[in-house]
Image (cartoon, helix red, strand yellow):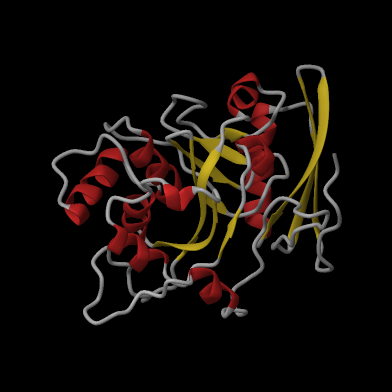
Amino acid sequence: MLHRITGRATKCGPAAISAIAGVPTHEAAATIRRLFDRPSVNGVFMDELAAALAEFGWTPDYAIRHPKLRDRRFARSEEAWERIFAGVPFDERAMTLGTFLDPAPAGTWAISASNHFVAYGDGFVADSGAWVSRKPRPWFRADPDCDRVARRRIREAVRFVRAAPGAARLSPAPESGQAHSPDRQAQAGAEPSRPASPRPVSHGKEAPVTGRFLVRSRMFTLGIGAAMDSRFDGREEAEAYVERAMKHFPGSRYDIREDAAGPGPQEC
């Protein structure tokens, strides 16, 4: 569940941290400056964003990266990036923001698209205000603001989860004597204990989606109707999602059900 973005800093990186962790943007920017010894924060890389979120109790769990990401500058510090994302499973896929968000993936994500960060959480998006708004709003293609940026190319999308109490924070500095594995995809395949990653349909198969409670939504706005499913681990999270969605789409219908059997195909 995203938070309303608050704080004096206006850049998209601190704004994404604010939306996910619920801290002011100037506090997020101050954390990045401290961790990476930066005089100012005018742009943020994914390693800086992940390190700052780790300070606030969030860790990366799964990532989607553009196939050509390695050919571009992707991190403030490669050592920090390797340290933070070591062992995090990932897929390499070329997709747009709309392709990724239209199926309503579960979880909380920080998405880098066209040199801009967007925060996404269980059907809602927020950013610095350049694309959408600082207040979380439903991702819905009938919304002109969402449709306007739906074709933006995703460079990297990382799902973050709350760290377990007492878990060690991810430090941007490498540990002494720690070796970095060159084959990170092999590491990802060696970790079957990680939960299934909710993501859009790929190669004609439905991707697994976690969550015990299913919210089936039938939204009506601008004369267009659309159905989608969202999943949550607890009923309170599902009810909060419905309450927020009803404020934006009061004429829509929502059905909360407990579904332990797992999801079926997404409705179009």
**Which residue is at a point 23% across and 51% down the rendered structure image?**
31
Above or below residue 232? Residue 6 is above
**Drawn side of residue 127 relative to residue 255, left or right:** left
**Drawn side of residue 77 relative to residue 145, left or right:** left
- The residue at the far front in this view is 71
**Which residue is at a point 28% across and 50% down the rendered structure image?**
76
| Residue 258 x %, y % | 80, 61
Q: Quadrant of residue 25?
A: top left
Give 194 or 165, whichever is nearer the viewer.
Answer: 194
| Residue 34 x %, y % | 17, 53
**Drawn side of residue 72 relative to residue 126, left or right:** left
Number of disc labels: 0
Above or below residue 225? Residue 208 is below
Above or below residue 148? Residue 262 is below
| Residue 212 x %, y % | 73, 64
Give 35 or 246, whichever is nearer the viewer.
Answer: 35
**Drawn side of residue 31 relative to residue 210, left or right:** left
| Residue 129 x %, y % | 44, 26
Give 75 or 245, whichever is nearer the viewer.
Answer: 75
Indicate the quadrant containing the C terminus: top left, top right, bottom left or bottom right. Answer: top right
